[in-house]
Amino acid sequence: MLNHLHVWLFLIGSIVLACNEVELSRHSDEDVLLATVDNKTLFLSELDGMLPENTSSGDSVKIINAYVERWIRKSLLMQEAEKNIPQDLNIDELVRDYRASLIQHSYEQVLVERELDSLITKRELSEFYEKNKEQYQLDAPIIRCRFIKLPKNAPAVSEIRSLWGKNEPEEKNKLLELCMNNASEYLLADSIWYKVDIIEKSLPKGTISNNNIGSRNAFTIQDGDFLYLFRLLELVNRKEIAPLSYIENQAAKVILHRRKIKLLEDKKEELYEQQTNNIRVYPFNGQFEN
């Protein structure tokens, strides 16, 4: 990338930096000083790899200009932070702890990717649901339904209406095909649960709501532009337990998280057992030195 930068290197001399008229000067035959803030310096080589391939000279200058301005402000903020650092703050200890956390986190990610079983069976989901379903009480009604919003002038209106109440697979597939080509909106997947307010937004105002959905089993209505067909298949009311199919994704995430925790804890115990001979524990008698 530096070879690419050398093509337009002479243009850098024209960049004006908002840093008390600091002028660019060569650091070596292979580098250029871009900015300084007190004793901090920014050289062109530090931007190696930042520019996309085939970037024009003009665009490269703009990108570097913007980077330099951000670097100056970041350096000034760091300078101010260093002046106001608490006297009792142990930076070296914080850096060690942070480094250790990064290393551990990186290893845990590798371990999880390599060893965590991510396959969850229907039986596991069902067992989890039976043990934990009281935690999944609904705060709003959910429904399974069929719904079509169709322009009144759509060429397939009559055919869609004739297929609307049919349940044979061939007829349902034909209805789906017609909706794909004619409807503004449609929901024809019988197994999917929706919050009522999601469907409510697609219907004329006041048609359905959380309060009246129990009495709106099926209807066909129209307004100035659209025909609306709706059929309620199943309703689960507020404060009732959500069905497994509604919380399945949440349940799967919890199961995987628990597996991950167990995997990591088991690995700690395995390492402990393997390294027992290398571990020394010095009993503490409760006495602190003054």
Image (cartoon, rainbow, N blue to C red):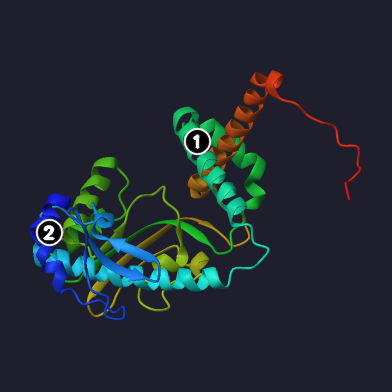
Q: Secondary structure at mark 2?
A: loop
Q: In the rendering, at what x and y percent does residue 280 appear?
A: 75, 26
Disc 2 residue type (three-letter): Thr
Count neighbours of disc 1 (C-alpha within 10 A) and say few if under 14, some if 14 to 19, many if 20 or more. few
Question: For this view, does 65 lie left or right of residue 143?
Answer: left
Q: To which residue does mark 2 refer?
A: 55
- Specify the label residue 254 is tagged with: none
Residue drawn at x 31%, y 78% is: 19
Residue 232 visible in this rendered orientation of the protein = yes
Question: Considering only vertical position in the picture, is 44 above or below 113?
Answer: below
Q: In the rendering, at what x and y percent does residue 127 appear?
A: 61, 35
Q: Tell which circle, 1 or 2, labels the residue nearer the N-terminal end.
A: 2
Residue 28 or residue 174, whichever sits in front: 28
Residue drawn at x 70%, y 21% is: 276
Question: Considering only vertical position in the picture, is 119 above or below 246?
Answer: above
Q: In the rendering, at what x and y percent does residue 34 appear?
A: 25, 66
- Quarter where residue 228 is shown: bottom left
The label nearer to you, 1 versus 2, is 2
Q: In the rendering, at what x and y percent does residue 181 appear?
A: 16, 57
- Specify the label residue 107 is tagged with: 1
Residue 154 visible in this rendered orientation of the protein = no
Tag 1 near tag 2, CB within 8 Å = no
Q: Secondary structure at mark 1?
A: helix
Question: Considering only vertical position in the picture, is 78 above or below 121?
Answer: below
